[in-house]
Amino acid sequence: MKLFVGQRVRAIRSLSLQLIFVPGAAFLAVLASTADFNPGWARYVTFVGVAAGLVVAAIARFTRLANSRFTTRVVVATMALTTLIGLSIQPSAIGVLTAFVFLGIAVGSAAFLRLRTATFVSAGCTLLGLIVILCRSSIPVVAATIFLALMTITSIVVIVLRQSLQAARDEAIALSLTDSLTGLANRRSMEANIPVMIALAERTGQHVGCLLLDIDLFKVVNDTHGHETGDEVLKTVAGVLRNTTRESDVCVRIGGDEFCVFTVVTTRDDLQRIAERVRVAIAGLPSTPHLTVSVGGAVTQPEMGRMHAADGLDELLRQADSALYLAKAGGRNLVKIG
């Protein structure tokens, strides 16, 4: 899911660069063609800026280079070009107006760059904007005061909005990856994160163990005691899983009364011990109705790490499910490791 979010951020950044730099290049082309510059070579630098803007838009559209570092470099180059135009364009009143372009640069940076980077960019924009205003304005104090007020207010508003949106996004992501009843990870979270866990474990010479748990006779519990009691049973089992597994383990409610635990192990014996600890803890609960679970387990094999990510997870679950079938066939309240 983090990978998915990162892809979305890059897509938004790429689209934003295209929407900014295509019309921006057109505006610069008109400006370079019609305005006067002193010194004259600044006009040619502005035309170079037009070409560079189109190149940036093309890179953002057709490549994957529009990352945070690339965007930062583009912002710095834009700041330099804006300063040159502001100091050289004639008459001076247009140069003063050009200084307010730094306001847009600072706001865009606050929206898309890392907070620390955006802070430095905002400070740089403020300094350069003041330099242009003080050099070109006939009323520098008034113009600088207005510029500083606008820069401060808009930067604060954008940063606060950005943090609020990030908090809302993080909360939405957490909800989408969590089972609402038990608070455990859900199937979507499992499918997003466990393949990465398998690949990393294989690279370090370790294995991922998968325990598939099924509450014995859960349908009878629902039919006899009602669905409200059934929900409490599910939450109780989820609590046991949290308390009997390591913090690094991933506990998942797949659906219904089926749970999964993914843990990094070195041997099948390690997985067997974890499974027995969970089984004994649930069987020892002083609950009514009395609860037991059947547990099937499997450990990743080297070839799973070389499979497509989703295929490796599916194969691990298939093997664990086969072992779970044997545990149920053996009389329930058993552990079988495939």
Image (cartoon, rainbow, N blue to C red):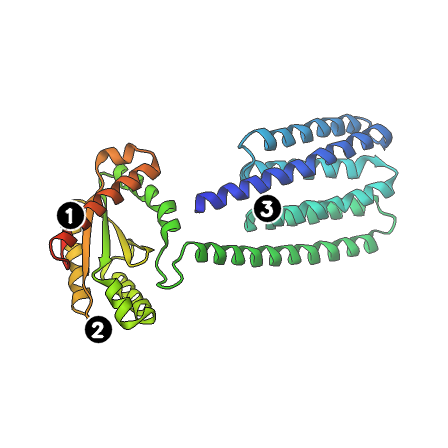
Question: Mark 1 and 3 residues: CB-CB less than 8 Å, in contact?
Answer: no
Q: Mark 3 packing: few (<14 Cα in 10 Å), some, or many (20+)?
A: some
Q: Which percent across, then down, holds residue 299?
A: 20, 43
Q: Mark 1 packing: few (<14 Cα in 10 Å), some, or many (20+)?
A: many
Q: Label 3 belongs to which residue?
A: 112
Mark 2–mark 3 Cα distance, whole angstroms, equals 53 Å
Instruction: Give the mark nearest the N terminus, 1 or 3.
Output: 3
Q: Given the image, on which type of amino acid does mark 2 rest?
A: Ser
Mark 1–mark 3 Cα distance, whole angstroms, equals 49 Å
Instruction: Give the mark nearest the N terminus, 2 or 1.
Output: 2
Task: Point out which mark residue 287 bears.
Answer: 2
Q: Label 1 belongs to which residue?
A: 337
Which residue is more in the foreground, 139 or 8?
A: 8
SS state under label 3? helix
Q: Given the image, on which type of amino acid does mark 1 rest?
A: Ile
Which residue is more in the foreground, 44 or 235?
A: 235
Q: Which percent across, then down, holds residue 249?
A: 28, 53
Mark 2–mark 1 Cα distance, whole angstroms, equals 27 Å
Q: Which percent across, then down, holds residue 134?
A: 80, 47
Asked if residue 131 is positioned above or below residue 26 in the image, the reply reads below
